[in-house]
Image (spheres, rainbow, N blue to C red):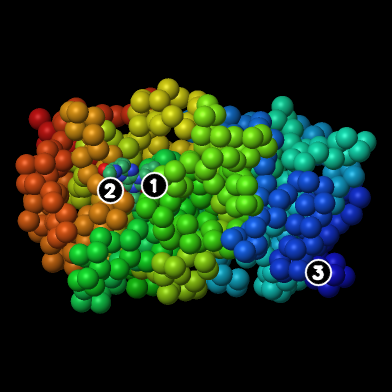
Amino acid sequence: MIDPKNVKNKALVDWVAKVAELTTPDNIYWCDGSQEEADKLFNEMIAKDACVKLNQEKRPGCYYFRSDPRDVARVESRTFICSKTKNDAGPTNNWMDPKEMKEKLNGLFKGCMKGRTMYVIPFSMGPIGGPISQVGVELTDSAYVVVSMRIMARVSPKVLDVLGENGKFIPCLHSVGVPINKPEDDVKWPCNPENTYVVHFPEERLIMSFGSGYGGNALLGKKCLSLRIASVMGRDEGWLAEHMLILGVKDPKGNKAYVTGAFPSACGKTNFAMLIPPAAMQKKGWKVTTVGDDIAWIKPAADGKLYAINPENGFFGVAPGTSMDTNPNAMLSCAKNTIFTNVALTDDGDVWWEGMTKEKPAHLIDWHGKDWTPASETPAAHPNSRFAAPIENCPSLDENWEKLDGVPISAIVIGGRRPKGIPLVYESFNWTHGVYLGAMMGSEVTAAATDVKAGTLRSDPMAMLPFAGYNMAQYLGHLVKMGKNLSMTPRFYHVNWFRKSAEGKFMWPGFGDNARVLAWIMQRQNGEAKGRETAIGFVPNYEDIDFDGLEYSKDTFEELMSYDAETVSAQPLKEELYEQLPNALKIEREALLERLS
Ligand code: TSX
Ligand code: MN
């Protein structure tokens, strides 16, 4: 615990007092992020039956939570960007007048922490004190949020030292929205779905979240701060907050390059960030390392290169589909000191989820807390069940992952699930063309997403649709600008791991074999790999890809690399957004149509 008497930042002390007056918690507790503190909170939650300590021989330091079934994912319909004008929020965000929203929220927050403890969590996104890092303070009445935040962010008294007397922090206010008026109100997973709001005030750099205890709605350092608020800071200060993984690639000569990647959900971004090259490539000396799996803060440096940091300290990964076959590095990352939410519980106190093992266990307790057998018709783990795992557990962690100034970025990979008409990989002609490809990104909706019909293509520019903290058209304009005046301009690579044959089979093995594409990308940047110019960009010839250890015929490759003019030139953006796009991107579209005609 931090002694509040030692807190020197007046703005912070005042804000905590003001919020306490509004929300009327029984206690205020300043978190230090220590293991002892976490142990105490876990034990309190276990005593209330809100948490399960997993089998400590199999999962040391691991705990398990089940959420309320109404509180299982981010809620985009209740996520708001309350900028001064509606146009600043743009055509793809929910907007409400900030004054009106404040009034509404002040009504909801009034007395909402009654009977609970208000935790003060000082955290840093990025290494504490780093030049690209940002300090946030989350006030929350959820102990689950406290123990999760200390995995996902850096929670420490050192953050307050960095703040000093006058340092700036991003205030993040959170409540599950369930005051305890009578003992029955003290439920295992409190939430208030009818009144859930996840709200950003971009000019004030303020976040207020009410009614949900789950993931991105509640761990406010992640999507709310590191993407929505940070994207606005980046616009104002000349940098980028991107929904991107960061990985390192080492070639057989020992050259190292860093690559970022933007993919919509359900495309295997975490798997790509932790990719293990095929044995034949490893033998030659190829190696892939992980810097981050979700968020990149990217800044131009004095040398004219773009440098990226991963602001996070952990992985908040989707559990189902993760296995020792699909992603051993993720499995090993959640072997210890991990919090699992909404997965299934095995009879020996371990966790299980769909896709973890080939054989399903004979008996489980499912994410509802009910008995489950392979004959059950519902999944044992919720499709959006998660692990929150410390990044330090990751065997493929890059040696420079915490470098204060970040790692230099050589290439930007983008893509989506495109069963038809889009090649395995193509390279942009230049930065603006790359941003155009990012703007037109889309992905086929899988069954996991509930709001859109499965099988339809959903537009998701730069995978930022739910995460841009301001007008999406202006965001794309800012991205165009950020490519100017660089000495090393990363090229964009549009990839598609999900092409299907006429028979409906995946045409590319994906997973570790994607290293073959990464190798081409890296060698293009070095000037070592050839390619061929087409109307859509540069593409590898069959000879330009290392197929060592993989039987893949030239004919199949040609089919995999072919494009359909109609598909590559589709304009999936909603009309209001397309109209507002910067001219440079509209010109890219005209040039593409011209090249295709
Ligand atoms: O993550 C995936 N990646 C990226 C890995 C580095 N997935 C899983 C997506 C769900 C989150 C993939 N699925 C990938 C991929 O490259 N490719 C596919 C499609 C696919 C699925 C199964 C096979 C092949 C391709 N299996 C066999 O062919 C045996
Ligand atoms: Mn994400």
Percent across and percent down for residue 345 are: 61, 45
Judged left or right of residue 142, residue 69 is left
Q: Is residue 579 visible?
A: no
Whole-angstrom CA distance, mark 1 to mark 3, is 39 Å
Bin the neighbour count of mark 2 within 10 Å (Cα to Cα): few under 14, some 14-19, many 20 and up: some
**Closest to the observer, 386 or 578:** 386
Task: Classify mark 1: helix, strand or loop.
Answer: loop
Residue type at the position of mark 1: Gly
Whole-angstrom CA distance, mark 1 to mark 2, is 10 Å
Q: Which residue is mark 3?
A: 2
Q: Is residue 250 above or below residue 563?
A: below
Percent across and percent down for residue 405 are: 46, 72
Bin the neighbour count of mark 3 within 10 Å (Cα to Cα): few under 14, some 14-19, many 20 and up: some
Q: Which residue is mark 1?
A: 268
Label of residue 187 in the image: none
Whole-angstrom CA distance, mark 3 to mark 2, is 48 Å
To which quarter of the image does residue 77 belong? top right
Label of residue 510 in the image: 2
Name the quarter where the N terminus is drawn. Answer: bottom right
Asked if the residue at label 3 sits under 8 Å from ligand 2, the reply is: no
Single out the mark in the foreground, 1 or 3.
1
Judged left or right of residue 14, residue 466 is left
Give the residue at x 60% y 73%. 129
**Closest to the observer, 42 or 291:** 42
Q: Is residue 510 above or below residue 147?
A: above
Percent across and percent down for residue 389 are: 56, 58
Check whether the beta carbons of the residues at disc 1 and disc 2 lie within 8 A of each other: yes
Percent across and percent down for residue 542 are: 8, 51
Give the residue at x 43% y 73%. 400
